[in-house]
Image (tube, rainbow, N blue to C red):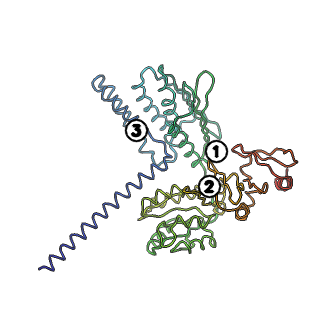
Amino acid sequence: MVVLVAWMTLYVAMHELQQRREAEGRAFRLEVVAQQAQLRGLRAQLHPHFFFNCLNDLRELIAEDPERAQQMVTQLAGLMRYSLRTNHSELVSLADEVVAVEDYLALEVIRFEERLRVHWDIAMEVQNMRVPPMLLQTLVENALKHGIARRPQGGEIRIAIRADDVRMELEVLNNGEVREPPSGDGIGLRNAQERLNLIYGERAKIALENTAGGWVRAHVTLPLSPIEVPDRGEKLKALLVDDERLARAGLRRLLRAHEDVVVIGEANNAEVAAHKIRRLQPDVVFLDVEMPGQNGLELLEKIEVGPVVIFTTAYQEYAVRAFEVSALDYLVKPIIPQRLASALDKVRQAFALAEAGPKGRRQVFLRDGAHCWMVMMTDIRLIESAGNYTRVHFGCNSPLICRSLNALESRLDPTVFFRASRSHIVNLRQIQSLDKGPDGGLVAMLTDGTKVAITRRQSQKLRERLSL
């Protein structure tokens, strides 16, 4: 009897422990999803304050004007439905976007009353064209929040949309003035530009400027078609790195559903993975973070120039860290087919944005102190010597790394990077203009405005190379 009671007690304890772990796992996955949404922050959504204001207005209208309150509920429901329905859509019809913005403005008119006036000017031929969801709404919300709302007398918002054979132009004007935004402001427009870059590459632009007469002009230029992933005539080569054999087998099985992906190898630790990355040159690595010996983050430092990386992890802290080092994506174990498909779509689009096949899509892992970056080689503008160190310039960052300029040069693509002098290597694709220098050499103006002197000897090589 004692043994039976002991076994029953043990069984109940194990059962409760298993249920607790499953509950913790579900909570963790929900938290990771929330972290993912917060870290990316690229999809424009309605501001929470907008909903709070609407609910407050609705409470007052119910007693004051029940019929108008009912209309307000209908408009708010329609706007929320549109936001949720298009949350995973890359493009929507402009007609649907306009209806959503009309609902949004109608709700704001209730709050601003006569302080808000709206004028529409939309060409008939653009109604069936497609735009990223919530793009126009972001422009209008920006005009309202940073323009009309800050003026005691309010103002007017003018919305105009035109198109020709190759592009569409969206323009939103509002009374006011562009000022240096306080910390945290302007995120909506920056995120909108990043979304456009993912969909259209460099062919889509957002501009915000002051114009005559006290108007602020937000102008968006969109090509009529997004980036198309080219038929590269070859498959994506994938390397699976995980210390658990069953995890690698499960991922390999899921990848069979994608005909354009071929698994070219596996590795059960960082050392083997580093060797296979150099030898096999994969296009994408599915990389487990927590492994015996070196972990996945340490592996990235070791390989220096490598493929696109998708982390696979069961730990929240590593999922967040994956974005800090600019991994393309991460997958939480157990991996579900939908998330894997989404990650692979990002890989395909990444190659399309690079305007090259997989061999042209290479990254470098950089660390400066506690800060880490996974940088596309094509994004590096300038590499300059700093004694025994080297400073790498990309975006708004210029980390200092513990390697000499000569050591880095041997790893660079000579068709992209050019040795301008003993102290500088420039990305040829980042040169905006070339002028004559005082010593008979050339001076390169980079896309960020930086000027780099090129020696006479190297200038002659560059002239021959570019047929100047």
Mark 1 lies on a secondary structure that is: helix
Q: CA distance from mark 3 to mark 2?
A: 35 Å
Q: Residue at x 76, y 56 (%)?
A: 418
Extreme-left residue of the structure: 1
Which labelled disc corresponds to residue 352? Answer: 2
| The image quarter in which residue 359 lies | bottom right
Which labelled disc corresponds to residue 203? Answer: 1
Mark 2 lies on a secondary structure that is: helix
Give the amino acid type for the residue marked by disc 3 in the picture.
Pro
Is residue 260 visible in the rendered image? The answer is no
Which labelled disc corresponds to residue 85? Answer: none
* Residue 273 screen position, x and y as percent: 56, 72
Mark 3 or 2: in front is 3
Q: Is residue 137 above or below residue 117?
A: below
Is residue 220 visible in the rendered image? The answer is yes
Query: On the rendered image, what quadrant is the N terminus found in?
Result: bottom left
Residue highlighted by disc 3: 48
Q: Is residue 377 above or below residue 170?
A: below
Q: Is residue 311 above or below residue 200?
A: below
Q: Residue at x 41, y 54 (%)?
A: 33
Classify residue 184 as left or right of residue 220. left
Mark 3 and mark 2 lie on one chain; the one further toward the N terminus is 3
Give the amino acid type for the residue marked by disc 2 in the picture.
Ala
Give the amino acid type for the residue marked by disc 1 in the picture.
Arg
* Residue 98 screen position, x and y as percent: 49, 34
Q: Are marks 3 and 1 in contact (CB under 8 Å)?
A: no
Nearest to the observer: residue 151 or residue 79: 151
Extreme-front residue of the structure: 387
* Residue 277 screen position, x and y as percent: 60, 70
